[in-house]
């Protein structure tokens, strides 16, 4: 697994959040045509996007990767019920509104972050485009990750995050290449630093989130907002056929990133960027004046 502690010129910053300050990495373009807001997956963090932040900024887009509430360095609620995609999506929508004042915003959600990004759109986030990266239509139904969630919850409740992480790390290393010592320590630190309520609440959501694709398709159609479904060719999260079906139901094609599994931004950033950069450039429409009220106007006309 490639090192997730990737060198980047993105600066650390904090953003206001519903449950307290959100930790973020910010890479600013000289003359940005818009903003790309990146939401990480379960047990992930803003660092998972490190390899693609500078290239996005270099292509003229302000790139902002955040820790979701309760993740790693972001403050969070002490209530597990606050970590559903719906509630986190409302927090994400507020962030989109904030950045939308300065120009168009594309929302990218990875894995569980894709469920949160979907919920943000359903909450009315004024996005210019939506990218679902290695995400799915609903909860996990089976597989290694589903089994890990089932085993991890009672262990975490009984013995805490450190013990739960040691089991998860041991199981992961049994089927994947062991990380470097530096990366292993980072992965451990961000897991045990994340709130227990967040880990448990998000884990429960990954076993119970309903299929809301039809709602999402209607919301995107109402505003004329494009969507992309991007998948690593060896993704071990949601099955590739499920993601392909999701793309079809959303009226788009599934894009496969070669030499990548569940984390293309880390495993093959060049391959992911080869898809993302032209896609986002087209969506953000360089040179067109930004009208913050435009999407609301379109929604009223088509709603």
Image (cartoon, rainbow, N blue to C red):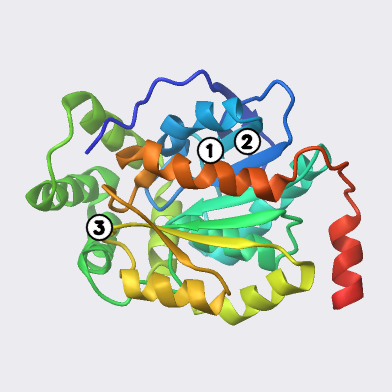
Q: Return the disc, 2 or 1, that comes first in the chain's sequence.
A: 2
Q: Are marks 2 and 3 in contact (CB under 8 Å)?
A: no
The mark closer to the camera, 2 or 3, is 3
Residue 253 appears in view: yes
Mark-to-mark CA distance, 2 and 1: 6 Å
Which callout, 1 or 3, points at the residue further toward the start of the chain?
A: 1
**How many C-alpha atoms fall within 10 Å of the one at disc 1: few (<14), some, or many (≥20)?**
many
77 above or below 146?
above
Q: Residue at x 69, y 78 (%)?
A: 218
The alpha-carbon separation of the residues under discs 1 and 3 comes to: 30 Å
Name the residue tied to disc 3. 234
**Location of mark 2 (residue):** 21
Residue at 33%, 40% in the rendered image: 268
- Mark 1 or mark 3, which is nearer to you? 3
Instruction: Give residue 286's quadrant in the image.
Output: top right
Q: Nearer the viewer, residue 162 or 256?
A: 256
**Circle 1 sits in a helix, a strand or a loop, which is it?**
loop
N-term-proximal mark, 2 vs 3: 2
Q: Position of residue 120 (x, y in %)?
A: 65, 60
User: Observer-nearest residue: 66 or 272?
Assistant: 272
Q: Residue furthest left?
A: 174
Name the residue carrying label 1.
74
- Tell me whether the residue at label 2 lies in contact with that at label 1, contact meaning CB atoms closer than 8 angstroms: yes
Asked if 153 appears above or below 142 in the picture, the reply is above
Categorize mark 3 by other alpha carbons within 10 Å: few (<14), some (14-19), many (20+).
some
SS at mark 3 in the image: loop
- Residue 13 pos. (x, y %): 60, 25
């Amino acid at each position: 697994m490639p090192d997730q502690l990737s060198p980047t010129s993105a600066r650390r910053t904090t953003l206001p959040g519903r449950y307290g300050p959100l930790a973020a990495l910010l890479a600013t373009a000289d003359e940005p045509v818009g903003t790309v807001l990146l939401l990480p997956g379960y047990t992930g963090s803003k660092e998972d996007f490190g390899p693609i932040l500078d290239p996005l900024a270099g292509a003229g887009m302000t790139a902002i990767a955040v820790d979701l509430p309760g993740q790693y360095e972001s403050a969070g609620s002490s209530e597990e019920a606050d970590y559903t995609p719906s509630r986190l999506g409302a927090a994400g929508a507020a962030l989109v509104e904030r950045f939308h004042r300065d120009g168009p915003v594309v929302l990218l959600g990875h894995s569980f972050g894709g469920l949160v990004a979907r919920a943000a759109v359903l909450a009315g986030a004024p996005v210019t485009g939506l990218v679902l990266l290695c995400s799915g239509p609903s909860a996990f139904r089976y597989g290694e990750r589903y089994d890990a969630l089932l085993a991890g919850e009672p262990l975490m409740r009984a013995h805490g995050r450190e013990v739960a992480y040691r089991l998860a790390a041991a199981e992961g290393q049994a089927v994947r290449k062991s990380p470097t010592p530096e990366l292993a320590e980072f992965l451990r630190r961000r897991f045990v630093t994340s709130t227990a309520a967040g880990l448990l609440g998000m884990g429960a959501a990954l076993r119970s989130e309903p299929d809301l694709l039809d709602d999402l398709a209607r919301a995107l159609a109402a505003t004329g907002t494009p969507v992309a479904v991007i998948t690593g060719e060896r993704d071990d999260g949601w099955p590739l056929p499920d993601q392909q079906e999701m793309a079809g139901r959303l009226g788009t094609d599934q894009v496969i990133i070669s030499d990548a599994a569940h984390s293309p931004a880390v495993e093959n950033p060049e391959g992911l960027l080869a898809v993302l950069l032209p896609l986002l450039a087209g969506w953000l429409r360089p040179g067109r004046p930004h009208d913050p009220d435009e999407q609301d106007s379109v929604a009223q006309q088509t709603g």
